[in-house]
Amino acid sequence: MLTFEQIKELIELVAERRLQGVEIERSGFRLKIDGYMPVPAPAAGAHVLTSPIVGTFYAAASPDAEPFVEVGSRVKRGQVVCIIEAMKLMNEIESDVDGVIVEIFPQNAQAVEFGEPLFAIRTS
């Protein structure tokens, strides 16, 4: 079994080296640390809509509903493009420009951070 200090060192190493993660199994003890997940670069010349809050990204209003937008969708400023759930509140995120969605960065139900890219939008 690993000590708290050893676990802490592993976490720091994963973060420092920007590793994707590490998994250790020893004497029936298993530890998995997920790490760095690079955010792909947006399409050249595209406007990037970022997350205004920390929460969970949802592409649709409910699990059985169609997504608000898909790659290729034309959007207008003020149009709802996704929902971010934060502390049990569903926050509708609106496009801040007119254009066409060229990339959607997070997967449905993925945690997102403040300032993390959500959509690349080719402005029109």
Image: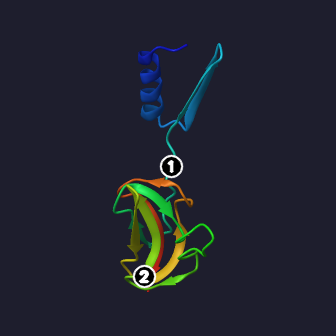
Towards the viewer: 41 or 54: 54
Identify the image quadrant of the C terminus: bottom left
The residue lying at 52 percent from left, 57 percent from top is 40
Q: In this view, does 39 lie above or below 9?
A: below
Q: Is residue 3 above or below residue 18?
A: above
Report whether 97 appears left or right of 105: left
Residue 80 lies, in percent from the top left, at: 44, 78
Residue 25 lies, in percent from the top left, at: 64, 20
Q: In the structure shown, which secondary structural element does the residue marked by tag 2 occupy? A: loop
Which amino acid type is shown beneath numbered disc 1?
Answer: Pro
Towards the viewer: 79 or 37: 79
Q: In this view, does 48 lie above or below 113?
A: below
Q: Reading the chain from its start, which is encountered first: label 2 or label 1?
A: 1
Residue 84 lies, in percent from the top left, at: 43, 63
Which amino acid type is shown beneath numbered disc 2?
Answer: Gln
Identify the image quadrant of the N terminus: top right
How many residues crowd mark 2 within 10 Å: few (<14), some (14–19), many (20+)? Answer: some
The residue lying at 41 percent from left, 68 percent from top is 48
Q: How many labels does the image show?
A: 2
**Label 2 – label 1 distance at C-alpha:** 28 Å
Say which residue label 2 marks.
79
Image quadrant in which you'd find residue 16: top left
Residue 28 lies, in percent from the top left, at: 65, 17
Towards the viewer: 69 or 87: 87
Say which residue label 1 marks.
38
